[in-house]
Image (cartoon, grey):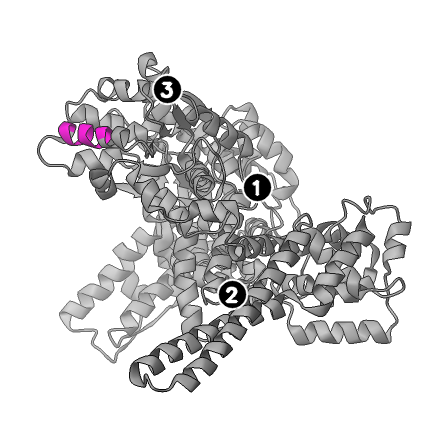
Amino acid sequence: MIKRELKKLELVESEHSHDLRHRLITLSFILFALIVFAITLTYVIGPGLLGILSRLFGLAMILLGLWISAFMFEAFARSSARDISPARRALLLMLLKVKEYDDIVSTFCESEAGRFALSRLEIEENTLDLYLKMRLENSDKLTLSEIEDHGDVKTEDDLDILDIVPLLVKHDSSFATFLNKAEIGEGALLASTRWYVERAVQKNEMEEWWRRGNLLSLPSLGRAWAYGGTYMLDRYARDLTEEAKDSYTQTSLPREEEIERLFSTLSRAHERNVLVVGGEGGGADALLSATANILVHGTLSKLRGLRLLSLDGASLLSATKGSSEDKLVTLLNEAVKAGNVILAFHDFGSFLGVARKAGIDLPALLDPYLESALPTIAVVDSNSYHEWIEPNPELGKRFEKLSIGKETEAELLAEVLRTASRDEDRGMVPISYKAARAIALAPKFFPAGLPRDKIHDIMEELLPEARKNKTNLIKEVNVHAYIEKKTHIAVGKVNVVEGKKLLSLEDELKKRVVGQEEGIVAVARALRRARTGIRGGTRPMGSFLFLGPTGVGKTETAKALADIFFGSEKRMVRLDMSEYQDDGSVSRLIGSFESGKQGTLSSMIRDNPYSVVLLDEFEKSSPEVRRLFLQILDEGSFSDMSGKPVSLQNNIIIATSNAAAEKIFALVENGAKGVVGKISLEKHRDELVREIVDSGVMPPELLNRFDAVVFYRPLSELEIGSIARMMLGSLADRLKEKGIVFEITDATIRTVMKYGYDPKFGARPMRRAIADHIEDLVARRIIEGKIRAGDHVALTRLDLD
């Protein structure tokens, strides 16, 4: 069979390639149109020029014949190869150029499919040419017969380009090494090649305007007149089918099982109603988009010509002045009379809630319409379903329930690729596959709103900017630069500057946190793992449990991390967990639907999506609160009072606790020695963790969710002196702004240590000691005129006594 297909394709492609035929058709038609225009113009201006008119008419007929011949040959070529899929056609075109002993890797790289796939993986053309030249010089070769000898090839009848690509990587070490150096895996190469195939499918469907699906999607005046008008609906609803006409056909449908069930219900004679449960996370948007795409580009006979209109009922009722109930009835009657409307209720739960507040019995109002032949799709999230639908079985029985999950990264990537293909064909800047993948992953950096909306927002900003800057290809680095500009979070590959910062993280932390070398090393290692993506998953950027006595540097470490990773200490937000000990604490954190109050944690994260979250005295929170954070540490998100997700993937979570402080004091006093001169708490990790678990302070499953459990030890007198010097340095900086030089003397440090150090409270009282004994003295002397701008101040023991 493959030989017959090769001959068929060779007959069509060898003499007149598709591109040549297409150019000939276009050129002959343009010339024909110009000559017809010239004939008309000549006839109007000079009716006596019959000789010229006859010659022009003859030339026009020749061009018309040429156009018809080229068009008929193109139609013949397409019909003769219609049974050959684009993926198989790409392979056959390769095989036309390769002989039995030729290198199939080089043939793939030089083919249209290979050039597209590799260029969209950001391999420059000159880089590819150099590799092919080196391959030829080194006599690197992989033949088709060698691949067949490995026994990995399917039967010839089923073989296509997508089957061959993985085998090239698998059986040719030179090609695999070339891809690895470019940071391209087998999966990425296959996906980029599949994108080429999907574009070929879309291109064929667009060019073959005579196909049944294309003809059915054309506007039809008679079809429009056959249905009633929807003047009010057009004002208040989004026509998703009209939007789908502006997009390309979905070559592979996501959620095929759900779509099949949805269309089965919509095709009934009565009660054609689907309740889509689980709309949070964009899953419902993906389903509705696929439905609209099928209605426009598909050939389903029962639903052909129907329009999918999305109505935000809650917004309609809130915005309507006067009798909102009458307006809603008018809209529903209009949909019924039109006869070609599928009505989708966006956020059906909010619609029911707003209607109740407005005094409208919405279930009773909708019931006759739901019982009739009006097809409807209602979208609710899980919380709204339990709140509004389950308590109302009469309303629930009118719907066929369809549960869905949130929109996946694969679905988002497919949407990006489809949109990129459409925009590129309209003259916009092309997008690489790596950039498309980065855009599909970008919504996690923008937690507010639906993922699908976010990817379209990003593309709408990137494409015009790239065109303005005359960029030839939008690359992954451009997407990462956009994200970093918007969020101030480093993404993508670690650059030289950031690499130095990460590698010197311990040194940066030691400048601010004194005497906690073991803890600093543990934090730095965990954050490096998180930044390089080794840890994986959707968890927060980092999560730590800091254990130890009060005043030893736990909060200062959190402030330092906020400054290093997010640019300012102000990017640290704090929750006093001792305030969340009672039974209603979870509702206060995530919000309460009954009271209508927003949650403290929900609002804090939405206002500070890129920050360090400090959970102070975490051990004092209630068990329910700790279970909430067990989910957050595991999944990187939680749902607020209305069921909307709140993401903490872009946050560093630090929980502090004084648990095991007494045990740590005991270990230090008993002189448990590790490194010379320092107490090693890491060597007693198991003992300390067992103390926490046995005392019931925290369960082991919660401890295991943290990236690191870090132990902070009591500070020595020498370390307290270093902290005093650092704090006095801040005072010196403030006085310097007033033109006063403040010298930090030994007497000043001893005074601060005398009044500001307590073994049980660490360095915490030190700020008060500086304020009471140093700042107060300096302030008094400035007022007395004893210290002026330009003075050098060095306080002695006599001054301080």
Label 3 secondary element: loop
Give percent across and percent down for residue 247: 44, 51
Give the side of residue 16 with respect to residue 23, left or right: right
As measured in the structure, the alpha-carbon distance from the residue carrying label 3 to the one carrying label 2 is 46 Å
Task: Check disc 3 and report the residue beneath it.
Answer: 271
Q: Given the image, on which type of amino acid does mark 3 rest?
A: Glu
Closest to the camera, between mark 3 and mark 2, is 3
- Labelled disc at residue 430: 2
Give percent across and percent down for residue 340: 33, 34
Q: Single out the residue that lies furthest toward the top.
A: 394
Give percent across and percent down for residue 207: 53, 58
Please state which of residues 130 and 288 is positioned toward the viewer in this rendering: 288
As measured in the structure, the alpha-carbon distance from the residue carrying label 3 to the one carrying label 1 is 74 Å
Task: Check disc 1 and report the residue beneath it.
Answer: 668
Label 2 secondary element: loop
Q: Given the image, on which type of amino acid does mark 1 rest?
A: Val
Please state which of residues 94 and 580 is positioned toward the viewer in this rendering: 94
Give percent across and percent down for residue 205: 54, 52
Tell me which numbered mark, 3 or 2, is placed earlier along the sequence: 3
